[in-house]
Structures are given as structure tokens and as C-alpha cells.
Image (cartoon, grey):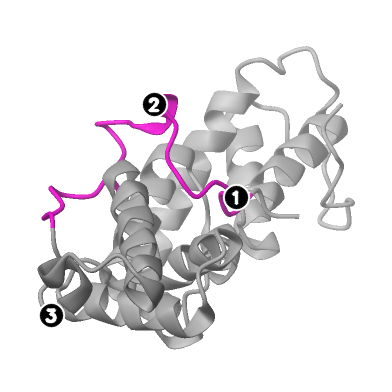
Amino acid sequence: MAETESVADDTAPRPDEVSTSDPTSSAEIPEAVPGDTAADSGDTTGKSADERTARETVYRLLAVRARSRAELLRALLRGGVAPETAEDVLDKFVAAGLVDDAAFAAEWVRGRHRQRGLGRGALREELRDKGIEEETAAEALHEVDTESEVERARELARRKSRGMSGVEPRARMRRLLGMLARKGYGQALAFRVVREEMEATEAGESLSDDEPWFEPED
């Protein structure tokens, strides 16, 4: 099963969540969203108070990293904001360009592929978990072409192989294939990469194409 990151359950960032190296970190957030009448009037009664709470929650979350609209909506609803108010506030953030699912998805794919070595399968699951629509996710996944995916899989297999010199060839193959499967790489690509790696280390001559292709790591 592909290795994925679960959707955060917090509605406010913790200090240790902030990372300047995170490719999905947000840019500077303005103090008010254009068209926000509650912010302009200073009214904190009734619906306006709910809007203010929603707006401040969104600002806090975006100060940590960029987020999808669905992530923000979940956080607002968990915090007790009325659904209609949450949708209205998020509409304003979208109109202001502060929430952009297409840009978020593209950056997420680039960062997770580069930093974690995730394949398209795992990336697709992560985007789905974050509420990104299928069409938007598919466009973002174009960032990872076959050549890039093969090269990243090779790097992962090569790195893991370094610590497996004493492991029997068939067991080594299954473990390497299992690792790539959990990273979201397809069976055919993973098998090709692992065979190349093992042949390069003279460990593949006794392997058959009929070997089991997945074994969980110890």
C-alpha cells in the first residue's frame, strides 16, 4: 500500500510545524481578504463573529503552509463554524488568490516526489486525501513524467540496496519491490528497476520473472 501523509487534524499550527524548507509553505498572508465586510466594519456580533473566527483560523493555517480548500473547510467545520459561513469565507480567500487548489496540488506533487521519492500512485492518494478534484490532481501529476519516476525509483532502490549486501537475492528483491510499492510505484516499473539494480550488483542471475513481487519489510 502506498505511503501517504494523513490530513492534519489541527485547526491552528504548532510552532514545530513551521518549516522554511517546505515547498508548500505559504507566502506572506495579508491581514484582510478583499470584500470581507465583517473585517471592514469591525462587527463581532452574530454571523460576523463567526466569519471573523473562520477568517482568523484560515490565516493561522495558511501561515504554516499552503492548504487545499477542502483541508481548510474540514478545519473550520471541526472548529464549529457554520457550513454556510465557512464556504462564504473560503470563497473570498479563493477570489483573493490565497487558496488555489491547482497551485497547491502542483507544488505538493513536486515537493513530495523530490523530497520523499513518492511515485504517482502515492501522490494521487495524497491529493485525494486532501480533497483535490480528480481533474486537478491529474494535471498536477503531469509534473512527474515516466523518466523522472524511473530515475527516482532507481535512487531509492540503490540507496536501500546498500544495506542489504548479506541478504539472499530473492528476499532482497521482494523487499526492494515492497518498498517501491509502498512509495506508490507501479508493479512493472518497480520490477524493471529492481532487476536492473540487482543485475548491476551481480545478484539477479538466479531470479525468475515469476517471483512474488511484494513482501512487507521486517
Identity, as a three-letter code, of the amino acid under mark 2: Pro
The part of the chain drawn in magenta is 4-31
Work out whether 8 lies above or below 104.
above
Residue behind mark 2: 15
The answer to whether residue 110 is seen in the rendering is no
Work out whether 135 lies above or below 201.
below
Residue behind mark 3: 35
Q: Residue at x 86, y 23 (%)?
A: 168
The spot of residue 87 in percent (x, y) is 41, 81
Tell me whether circle 3 and circle 1 mark residues in contact (CB < 8 Å). Answer: no
Q: Which mark is residue 69?
A: none
Residue behind mark 1: 9
Q: What's the magenta bit mostly, secondary-structure-wise?
A: loop
Q: Nearer the viewer, mark 2 or mark 3?
A: 3
Q: Secondary structure at mark 3?
A: loop
Q: How many numbered marks, from 0 up?
A: 3
Magenta span contains residue 30: yes
The spot of residue 146 in percent (x, y) is 42, 65
